[in-house]
Amino acid sequence: MHDMDIHIGDLYSTIVDREIEIIQGLSDEVLVHDAAISQACHIFAELDCLLSFADASQAYNYRRPVMVEDNVIDIWQGRHPLQEQVIDTFVPNNARLVGGAGRDPADQDYTSDSEIDLSEWNSVLLCTGANACGKLLNCTDGAGLFCGTLQHLLARGKACPKVLAATHFHDVFRVDLLDPQLSRISFRHMEVMFTASDGSLLPIGADTDTDTDAATDGAGVRCVGVGEKITYLYRVAEGLSLDSHAAKCAEMFGVPSRLVQRAQYVSHLLSTHELGRLLDEGMTEEERLDLQDAEAVCRRFLAWDLDAPDQDADAKTMLARCLGRKQDDDMDTDER
């Protein structure tokens, strides 16, 4: 190897130079046909896209939209191309929107062949109630931003864009904020279904006893019966819904009826900005004793040193002591 370096020299730089000469020559030959190659690439890219559309449309039964010059969107049995592939059952829904909510839709020059009553259309379609959305915002700031945004868009009149929105801020639908009777908004909600233990349908919001397993509390209000279920249908229905059915779900999953009713009452006071009425309520002797017991449990739990190396009992026993369950504590001690 040493002798070859002496007689021939280092060939690496010569090899690199030769490679550059070959690549440069090839580039000069190819660039002569740059326009034809670019055009062929564009054609093949468009063809690939169209073939993909055709293949997917045939595989998933898609329909080509009808494009019109009018400022309208009319979706019939719309489906989400990704979500319907990852769930067992997908429920298609409709959506109708017309641009320019600041004017009467009947005055618009709508010339489509489809016979549609535009007087029922708005630029803003708002979904409320159960299953409306999944994001959480600060109740005060979020509700203010929500109302302000919709009012700003509606105030643009003929320039109002088409808007699809969903909200859990049910307390904003008031005369002084977003009056459902006057606002140019199409209200929708997601349907739910309540069934009894025998499979029969239960009226939503009804207090009548339609199930023999259901009972009533001391105030005569219907309690959730054994085996009752709630089913989210994921089907859009017309109308404004101000019930997320959270209280009904809580009761179905074992939360005592009296707690559910209390939560509904406090939630109502909160939404009507009358929370101060709770300060005027007095406590019964039983409620006062319950509050004392709850305070004692909290103090015992806070006094528990979780980092202490010499714990005299396991976690279950210590929690029982915090809750004041002496019998559970003795049983655990006997078992050991």
Image (cartoon, helix red, strand yellow):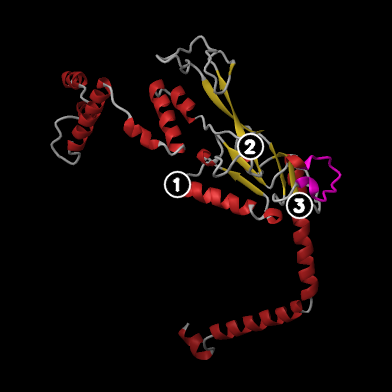
Looking at the image, do the residues carrying marks 3 and 2 touch, with CB atoms under 8 Å apart?
Answer: no
- Residue 188 - label: 2
Q: Position of residue 169 (x, y in %)?
A: 51, 41
Q: Position of residue 60 (x, y in %)?
A: 72, 40
Three-letter code for the amino acid on which mark 1 is drawn? Thr
Q: Secondary structure at mark 1?
A: helix
Residue labelled with disc 1:
140
Q: Residue at x 76, y 65 (%)?
A: 41
- Residue 71 - label: 3
Residue furthest to the bottom in view is 7
Q: Secondary structure at mark 2?
A: strand
Three-letter code for the amino acid on which mark 3 is drawn? Asn
Magenta residue span: 105-118
Three-letter code for the amino acid on which mark 2 is drawn? Arg
Q: Secondary structure at mark 3?
A: loop
Q: Is 22 placed left or right of 131 in the picture?
A: right
Q: Residue at x 53, y 12 (%)?
A: 211
